[in-house]
Image (spheres, rainbow, N blue to C red):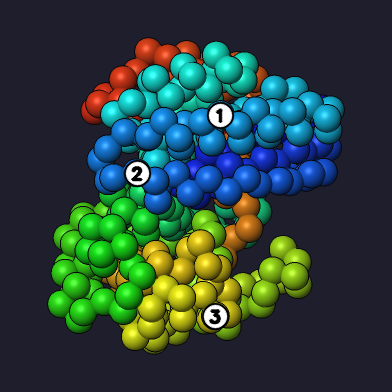
């Protein structure tokens, strides 16, 4: 069985085509298209028409790429940048009408569940009670669980891109000390209850996913990506604290020359580091393992393990929901 997943994020559209063998998704092709949707939007505003055109073109090309590699229509989802847009429904209808792709949005809590599943399968049962941290462009996902799926999930408006626009004037120039303090106060306030829950649960293992954590791990001394996914990569809180000071003194252009920090993410790297350090400090985590599997692998695993009906339910609920729905979509599943 060959399956594909399409992930529309704040900066890129990513495609993974994978074979399912013995219950494991084995990638056969990956591709990405740069969009930088978040950079074309006013925070809280709609996705502008030129950005929608770029999104349609990227989704159409990704869909054609999946077909060339022999995969069925991709399991396609969009994260916070589309989910929170006032014109979300119009954008999704436009994508469907012009590409045939049923792009859906996943509530942050469901993103956390799926990312947790990917991390659990990568780390294995020996990791025991597991805590998950995932910094995206618009939100921070936190999860904890002892089984296949988490017992507790939370999605908070603490994405690196969102906070960069809100507190750091876009992140192009070195911030003022009071800006960084204000940013940290916001993160601490938002995290207070979630962090208390993670401390109470006492995870044996903690993992971090997302490009933000991967780049911060590399900045703090983890092995580069060319060494492959099976090299263990750790990110220590003490190193991340030093990284916050280092990034605070530099412009985005200067950060882009640091190990691991890519030019497209340089502006938001400081906000990501502040969020990462603060959540580790408040939860009492001294180190996290950088996990290469995340939401895309979680979707593939759910598709393999539970069949296509669960994704059909996601799509159906997505059609029925509105952008302002206060109740998150929950996908029922037994722990195993």
Q: Which mark is residue 218?
A: none
Between 258 and 209, which is closer to the camera in this rendering? Answer: 258
- Secondary structure of the residue carrying numbered label 3: loop
Q: Is residue 295 visible?
A: no
Question: Which quadrant of the figure has residue 67?
Answer: top right
* Badge 2 or badge 1: first in the primary sequence: 2
According to the image, label 3 marks what residue? 257
Is 202 located above or below residue 105 in the figure? Answer: below
- Secondary structure of the residue carrying numbered label 2: loop
- x, y percentage for residue 65? 76, 33
Q: Residue at x 46, y 22 (%)?
A: 92
Between 26 and 202, which is closer to the camera in this rendering? Answer: 26
- Secondary structure of the residue carrying numbered label 1: helix
Q: Are marks 3 and 2 in contact (CB under 8 Å)?
A: no
According to the image, label 2 marks what residue? 41
* Badge 1 or badge 3: first in the primary sequence: 1
- x, y percentage for residue 241? 36, 82
Q: Residue at x 31, y 79 (%)?
A: 174
């Amino acid at each position: 069985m060959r399956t594909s997943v399409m992930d529309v994020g704040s900066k890129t559209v990513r495609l993974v085509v994978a074979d399912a063998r013995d219950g494991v998704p084995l990638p056969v092709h990956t591709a990405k298209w740069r969009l930088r949707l978040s950079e074309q939007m006013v925070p809280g505003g709609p996705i502008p028409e030129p950005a929608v055109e770029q999104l349609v073109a990227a989704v159409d090309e990704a869909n054609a790429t999946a077909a060339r590699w022999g995969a069925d229509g991709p399991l396609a989802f969009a994260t916070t940048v589309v989910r929170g847009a006032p014109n979300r429904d119009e954008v999704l209808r436009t994508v469907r009408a012009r590409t045939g792709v049923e792009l859906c949005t996943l509530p942050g809590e469901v993103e956390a569940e799926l990312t947790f599943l990917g991390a659990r399968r990568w780390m294995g049962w020996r990791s025991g009670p597991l805590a998950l941290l995932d910094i995206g462009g618009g939100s921070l996902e936190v999860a904890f669980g002892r089984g296949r799926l988490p017992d507790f999930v939370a999605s908070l408006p603490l994405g690196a891109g969102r906070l960069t626009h809100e507190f750091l004037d876009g992140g192009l120039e070195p911030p003022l000390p009071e800006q960084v303090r204000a940013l940290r106060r916001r993160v601490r306030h938002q995290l207070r209850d979630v962090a208390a829950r993670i401390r109470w649960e006492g995870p044996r293992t903690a993992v971090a996913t997302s490009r933000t954590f991967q780049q911060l791990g590399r900045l703090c001394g983890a092995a580069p990506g060319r060494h492959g996914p099976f090299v263990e990569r750790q990110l220590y809180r003490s190193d991340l604290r030093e990284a916050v000071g280092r990034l605070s003194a530099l412009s985005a252009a200067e950060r882009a020359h640091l190990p691991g920090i890519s030019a497209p993410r340089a502006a938001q790297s400081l906000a990501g580091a502040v969020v990462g350090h603060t959540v580790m400090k408040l939860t009492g985590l001294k180190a996290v393992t950088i996990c290469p599997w995340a939401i895309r692998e979680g979707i593939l695993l759910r598709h393999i393990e539970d069949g296509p009906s669960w994704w059909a339910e996601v799509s159906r609920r997505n059609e029925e929901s509105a952008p302002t729905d206060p109740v998150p979509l929950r996908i029922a599943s037994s722990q195993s």
